[in-house]
Amino acid sequence: MEGVRMSGRRVIQAGFRLLLILAALAPLGYTIHKEWPNLQTSLEGILWGKFATAQFLLLFVLAIVGIIPWASLRHLGSPFSYPKATGVYFFTQIFKYLPGGIWAFPGRVAVYQLLGVGSAQSVVSVFRETTAMFLGAAFIGLLGLLQGLSLSKSLSWAIGLGTLVSAGVILLIQMPWFWRLFSSLKLISKSPLTAYSEVDPRQRNVGWLPWTLIGSVSFWFLFGLPFRQMALAIYPQLESLTWLEASSIFALAWCAGFVVVFVPAGIGIRESALTLLLANIMPVGAALSLALLSRVAWIVAEGIWILITMVWFSRSSELSWESLRQQRR
């Protein structure tokens, strides 16, 4: 009987999650339906040579993201090389496309532990990496707003305040003193400080933040190069779009997809946000084309790195799918 109840709960939870995902995808679906003729026209006129160049550039820019886990792990005393930290990052990205969208995080924790990182250090590092990734995107996005993105004042203020508040909250929950204060108020039954308390006191400071943030800001800033190239491939009249504007537009859309945790990899949310932001500087059909194709380009580039790291780890004695399955058990 208990098993039946558990199965029922799982079915209800899965159904509720599906409804949330469909609700998140609804605005994008409506826009595609409404703009279908313009979308087709835009796709037919793409300069595929320029788009292929953008895809090639994106492949190399994505590799920069490895600086973030590398710097975080080094601060925690784990002597990971940059290639190894980058490999683990991409190896675990495949899990984020599973329902729920957060499986890359526990997957990376499991892989870190298989590679000899302590249990507490693994959890803390993943939290720090996620924080740095979001803060870098928020910084580039806010910088673009301050430089004068082509948005209405009300929209700029709404996006800016939302991004700033989200960045503040994400940064705040990484601080051990916050959880100590939160626990003292008895608002939660068990303190999430456990992982932090098991880490060497010398590693609980914010010394990890500068280097991981430098890596994140560098990644998001450089991301503007392939994204601008994609924009020009779809709408060549957009020569006035600067590198920073391209970076900040995508970074803001990525932040929107990140905070909606129940959607796998922010699918639908990021594209809707991108279309909204880009529609101020290009036709809606072209903006929608760019939003959709940028997702495809990201998946292709990330997929190539995932395949490379899967082959690498399959030939390594340190990690295998079998060891990962045993760790999850």
Image (cartoon, grey):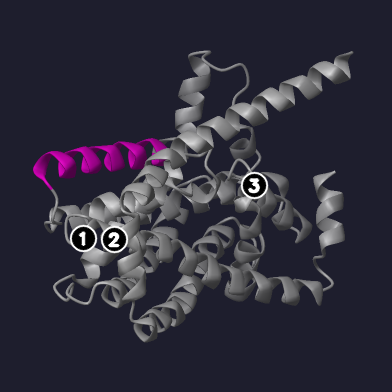
Front residue of this view, candidates 315 and 58:
58
Point out the tag, 3 or 2, that comes first from the N-terminus: 2
Query: Is 225 drawn above or below residue 137 in the view shown?
Result: below
Tell me whether circle 2 and circle 1 mark residues in contact (CB < 8 Å).
yes
Query: Where residue 72 sits: x, y (%)?
Result: 53, 58
Taking the image as shown, residue 111 lies to the left or right of residue 192, namely right
Identify the secondary structure beneath mark 1.
loop
| Among the two numbered marks 2 and 1 on one chain, the one whose residue lies closer to the N terminus | 2
What secondary structure is the magenta-colored segment mainly? helix
Q: Is residue 93 left or right of residue 184?
A: right
Q: Residue at x 52, y 32 (%)?
A: 20
Q: Amino acid at mark 1?
A: Pro
Q: In which quadrant of the rendered view does residue 278 lie?
A: bottom left
| Labels 3, 2: front one | 2
Q: Residue furthest front?
A: 37
Question: Which numbered dot is residue 265?
Answer: none
Question: Which residue bears the numbered disc 1?
Answer: 283
Q: Is residue 134 left or right of residue 140?
A: right
Q: Nearer the viewer, residue 203 or 22?
A: 22
Residue 138 visible, this angle: no
Query: Which segment is the magenta one?
Result: 152-171
Amino acid type indicated by mark 3: Trp
Q: Which mark is residue 103?
A: 3
Question: Label 1: few (<14), some or many (≥20) within 10 Å?
Answer: some
Residue 324: horizontal and vertical position, in percent? 80, 55
**For this rendering, which residue is in front, 28 or 70?**
28
Report which residue position mark 2 lands on.
38
Q: Earlier in the sequence, mark 3 or mark 1?
A: 3
Q: Is residue 146 visible?
A: yes
Task: Classify 16 as above or below 149.
Answer: above
